[in-house]
Each structure stands twice: as structure tokens, then as C-alpha cells.
């Protein structure tokens, strides 16, 4: 049955890269390279993004704008840490592209797309506005998303499952300092790669994938989120917070993390059948994980870091991404 599901289901991004993006009730469009003038539409039922951190130098606003402008969906979930109010309170920094991202989201709401903003720990001040709508954007503490296949997902930023944020302020500050250093290195490395006409490389996932304590923290976090989903009686949980996109099942619960737009440039999208797909979006869009009722292809630990390195990768290579054990 799993083999049948695998053969029958072509991921949205694979069809995009092969030159067509086709969903029911939609026309087939030619796919072009992201950033070109004739950008094809990425059509899906729902999209989830988080950890954009507008107001910080590390936000990859240009890639996010390219993604949003190609996106045609019915629902858009902003899963926390979209505007980094915490960083802005310490340092006033704002790039014009960051304002354009906000304008693009508001325009999507104006066009009738259902936009839900779920604040995270870096924009927690907006939690005081829960239940209100601002320019068509609904603000909620969390949400229940019912997929096209009937599966129910709890959607929240995910900081409520992070005990490291409670009480241990000196450890928190140490972790943030290390994270800022990695982001600084990521900016420097990718500035050089752009000058060399090389595609974007999410450096930090290589770091995280090779530090045992980081992986142990990520796995423990994922298990806490899955346990919370079981307690809420849902089929899965969609979150962000830890800047590590993932698709996997944990004791029958579907764990979906949409990643971030500071280091990894990832989003989660749902097609009209209810299939969930984690994608990386830069010069070379890459499929990272896929989940349907019949089949879950977990996100390879190193796929996000390694896939963009092959500058001449053929689109067919997306079909051969390894799966995690």
C-alpha cells in the first residue's frame, strides 16, 4: 500500500521543478527559476511559515518575498516569530524588504486568503490581541487545522514545549549568543557564495546536524510536541520555534516543523489531497519531506544543507532524496 501511495503521489514541488504545478480546479503552468519575471505559481491548499524574524539582519526577506509572490493558496498560517519585537526593542534595524513582506501578507489577506497569525515568543506582545483581526489577519494563540484528508493538526509556535526557556536565563543568553555567531557566519559565507554565483547554503543545519547535544535537544523537543498532540487528541502538530524543519511520525503522531526564514528558508505546504510537504526555497527549491495518510517520507537530516550544493542538479534528483532512518 505504501508503494502504491508513493507511486501515485507526486509532490507539489517535484511538479513545480518538472515544469508543471497541477492541482484540481487549477490550470497547469510552466515552471521557471525563482526570481525570474515569469515565475510560475506554486498552488496549494494551505501554507505554513514561521520564524521570519523581521527586524533582524539575518531575516532572508528576499527569498520569502519570492516564495509569497509565487504562492497561491486558500489559507496562510503565520506560526510565530514573524516580527522580532524582542530584537527591535534592543536595536532599531529595519530593511525596506521587511516592510514589503508585511505589505505582501496584507495584500494576500485583502485578496481573500485566510491569514492566521499565531504569535511566538519573539512577538509575544501580540498575544494581547488574540481574537482580533488586523487588516484581515486573524490573531490567535493557536489553531486547529483540518486537512483536506480529514486529519486534524494543532498549530502553535511551539515555545510552550521548550522548557529551556523557563528560569535558566543565563543559559538562554549563552544559547542566543552562540546562535547569533552562527547566523553571523551564515551571512558571511553566503555573501561570498553569492559573489561566486553559488546557491544559498544553510550553514547552521550542518552545525546542528553534527553536534550531539543539539540533536538530542531537537529530538527531545519533537517528542514533547508529539506527546502534547496526543494529549489534545489530534493527528499531528504543526509548529516552528527551533529553526529545524522536519517531517516525521512519533508513535503514530505526525510531527511537522515548518523551519524558519533566518537560516534555512523553509515552509510547509498542503496540497488538495491533504498531503503535507516541507520545502526549501532559494535559488534551487528542494523537497525535504512528505507526509500523506499512506506514506511518510521523513526529512533527511542533511538534505537541506547538501541539496543546494549541487549547482547542476537535474530535477529528477528530487525523486531520489534519501529518507532518514
Image (tube, rainbow, N blue to C red):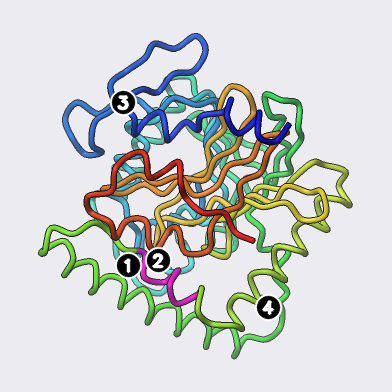
Quickly name the residue at label 1: 92
Q: Residue at x 42, y 34 (%)?
A: 14
Q: Quadrant of residue 198?
A: bottom left
Q: Residue at x 26, y 48 (%)?
A: 283
Sort mark 4 into few (<14), some (14-19) or many (20+) by Cα contacts within 10 Å: some
Please provide percent x and percent y for residue 233: 88, 43
Query: Relative to the observer, which residue lies in front, 183 or 168?
Result: 183
Q: Are marks 1 and 2 in contact (CB under 8 Å)?
A: yes
Quickly name the residue at label 2: 88
Question: Secondary structure under badge 4?
Answer: helix
User: Which mark sits nearer the N-terminus, 2 or 4?
Assistant: 2
Q: Which image quarter holds the C terminus?
A: bottom right
Sort mark 3 into few (<14), some (14-19) or many (20+) by Cα contacts within 10 Å: some
What range is drawn magenta here?
A: 202-208
Q: Are marks 4 and 1 in contact (CB under 8 Å)?
A: no
Q: Are marks 2 and 4 in contact (CB under 8 Å)?
A: no
Quickly name the residue at label 4: 164
Sort mark 2 into few (<14), some (14-19) or many (20+) by Cα contacts within 10 Å: some
Q: Say how many tags the image has.
A: 4
Please provide percent x and percent y for residue 176: 49, 80
- From mark 2 to mark 3, how far is it between C-alphas? 41 Å
Amino acid at each position: 500500500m505504501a508503494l502504491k501511495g508513493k507511486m501515485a503521489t507526486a509532490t507539489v514541488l517535484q511538479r513545480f521543478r518538472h515544469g508543471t504545478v497541477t492541482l484540481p480546479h487549477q490550470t497547469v503552468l510552466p515552471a521557471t527559476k525563482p526570481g525570474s519575471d515569469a515565475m510560475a505559481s506554486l498552488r496549494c491548499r494551505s501554507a505554513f511559515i514561521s520564524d521570519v524574524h523581521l527586524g533582524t539582519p539575518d531575516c532572508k526577506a528576499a527569498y520569502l518575498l519570492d516564495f509569497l509572490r509565487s504562492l497561491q493558496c486558500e489559507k496562510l498560517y503565520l506560526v510565530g516569530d514573524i516580527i522580532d519585537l524582542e530584537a527591535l526593542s534592543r536595536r532599531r534595524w529595519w530593511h525596506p524588504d521587511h516592510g514589503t513582506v508585511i505589505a505582501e501578507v496584507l495584500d494576500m489577506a485583502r485578496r481573500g486568503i485566510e491569514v492566521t497569525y499565531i504569535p511566538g515568543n519573539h512577538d509575544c506582545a501580540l498575544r494581547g490581541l488574540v481574537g482580533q483581526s488586523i487588516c484581515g489577519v486573524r490573531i490567535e494563540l493557536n489553531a486547529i487545522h483540518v486537512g483536506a484528508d480529514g486529519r486534524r493538526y494543532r498549530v502553535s509556535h511551539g515555545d510552550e514545549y521548550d522548557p529551556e526557556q523557563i528560569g535558566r536565563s543565563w543559559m538562554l543568553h549563552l544559547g542566543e549568543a552562540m546562535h547569533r555567531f552562527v547566523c553571523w557566519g551564515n551571512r558571511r559565507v553566503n555573501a561570498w557564495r553569492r559573489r561566486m554565483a553559488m546557491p544559498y547554503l544553510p550553514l547552521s543545519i550542518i552545525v546542528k546536524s553534527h553536534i550531539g547535544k543539539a540533536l538530542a535537544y531537537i529530538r527531545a523537543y519533537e517528542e514533547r510536541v508529539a506527546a502534547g498532540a496526543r494529549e489534545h487528541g489530534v493527528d499531528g502538530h504543526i509548529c516552528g520555534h527551533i529553526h529545524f524543519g522536519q517531517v516525521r511520525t512519533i508513535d503514530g503522531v505526525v510531527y511537522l516543523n515548518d523551519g524558519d526564514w533566518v537560516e534555512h528558508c523553509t515552509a510547509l505546504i498542503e496540497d488538495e489531497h491533504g498531503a503535507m510537504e516541507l520545502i526549501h526555497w532559494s535559488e534551487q527549491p528542494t523537497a525535504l519531506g512528505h507526509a500523506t495518510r499512506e506514506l511518510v517520507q521523513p526529512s533527511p537530516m542533511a538534505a537541506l544543507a547538501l541539496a543546494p550544493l549541487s549547482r547542476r542538479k537535474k530535477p529528477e534528483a528530487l525523486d531520489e532524496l534519501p529518507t532518514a532512518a
